[in-house]
Amino acid sequence: MQSHIRWLMAEIDRWKAEGVVSPEQADRLRHRYEQPPKETVPWGLLVFATAGAIVIGLGVILLFAYNWDEIPKFGKLALIFAAVIGAHAGGIRLLAREGWQPKLGEALTALGTMFYGAGIWLVAQIYNIDEHYPNGFLFWALGALAMAWAIRSTANGLLAAVLLAIWGCTEAFDFHTPEFWSVMLVAGGLLPLAWQQRSALLLAATLAAIQLLLAVNVVNWGGGAHAFTASLAWAVLLVAAARVTDADRPDFADGAGVMTFFGFGAFLVCAYMLSFHRAADGLLDWARQYGPRPALAHAFSWSLFALSLAGWLLIARRSLLQRAMEVRREEWLLPIALLYCFGIAFLNQRGWGNFVSWSFNLMLLGFAAMWMWRGCQESRLRPTVLGSLLLSAVVLARYFDLFQSLASRGLAFIILGGIFIAEAMYYRKMRQTKGGAA
């Protein structure tokens, strides 16, 4: 029962005791507002049972590891297969039941997937297999991915996202062989599952893995400039996808929020880096940064650019022509920034560092001003705080490369403090106005 309903039930009892309402009226009020009891998930049991299962599994592994050399080969294989099959069988059995037990069953299947991964390395040890070790993470990830789809499991999907990211990073860092398929497996294997399950957690893990693998692979294929522009295009694409999801899939509002977080987060990091004139030249210079496979880096960058542009053209058609969705004014700066950066990179225009940095400083200030203004107008704390933090970050960055004298630095801080005081007063005024109107 929710807290306000419990409060109302207590108040009805008090009114009845004080004679404010008759017993019949109290019964009618209680019958009208009392909610039927719902079967709740015992999260305490699930959390501690899952933790206990994992700890027991690790303990069993350590005990067998202590006597591993004494166990015959077929005994070792039997133990490995028994652990994997037992955990998965128990989990699938619980998944078929009603109530909270499927949650525990999903945790057991995730434990079985962990045993499966441990079994890969133990089998390699038993038979002295000296193999390319990232393949172990790949096979483990494929097993987790298959299990995630077989039982529609978010937990196994999270394991698959982590393992595929580890596989892609070990290939790139330890063997300098970035894998195109690492990005494709995460995007093609996990994004549809997160969408189907409406799992914001799995979507967040998948987007984080894609961003990491995208940067790692493209920087090895074509250098830092290509990785930067690909990440920028990916960020702009995510914000477009979030807006379309908001309009077309209101039942997955959490997913739109996750895409907005990762999209705006990556975009603001890219824009902040470009606000430094010394970094701006190198980050948009494709000509001086070649890797072993620049064609693949170009393909990734331009594919993401085309998808981002198509997404924003769709939004422009629906918001400006059909009036079917609304987009905040400052968000149109994202596709403009994307066109601007890809144009400079494609034309190999050098010596534009100062111009680029000033452009992105003004863009960041525009975002900060719009968020602060909208937050005060709507009496919403979150955009007000985000705009204030962004403004502070821009001023602090310019503290080191623009404001050279103590006088200019002091003046900058005085202006910043004055803006915050005026913002606080305006925010309070708008809250009072809305409170009075209500």
Image: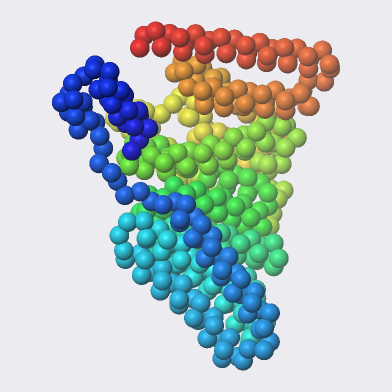
Q: Whole-percent x and y of residue 269?
A: 62, 37
Residue 207 is left or right of residue 38, and the answer is: right
Above or below, 307 against 297 in this view is: above
Look at 57% across and 77% down and name the residue there.
Answer: 119
Above or below, 13 against 424 in this view is: below
Q: Whole-percent x and y of residue 368?
A: 57, 23
Look at 45% across and 67% down and name the residue there.
Answer: 109
Camera-side residue of 434 and 288: 434
Above or below, 416 against 189 in this view is: above
Camera-side residue of 339 and 172: 172
Say how the picture is coloured. Answer: rainbow
Q: Quadrant of residue 297?
A: bottom right
Q: Is residue 168 visible?
A: no
Q: Quadrant of residue 213?
A: bottom right
How many numbered callouts? 0
Quadrant showing the N terminus: top left
Quadrant showing the C terminus: top left
Q: Is residue 327 visible?
A: yes
Camera-side residue of 231 and 208: 208
Look at 50% across and 35% down and name the residue there.
Answer: 335
Q: Residue furthest left?
A: 24
Look at 72% across and 12% down and name the residue there.
Answer: 414
Q: Residue furthest right?
A: 405
Q: Whole-percent x and y of residue 359?
A: 63, 26
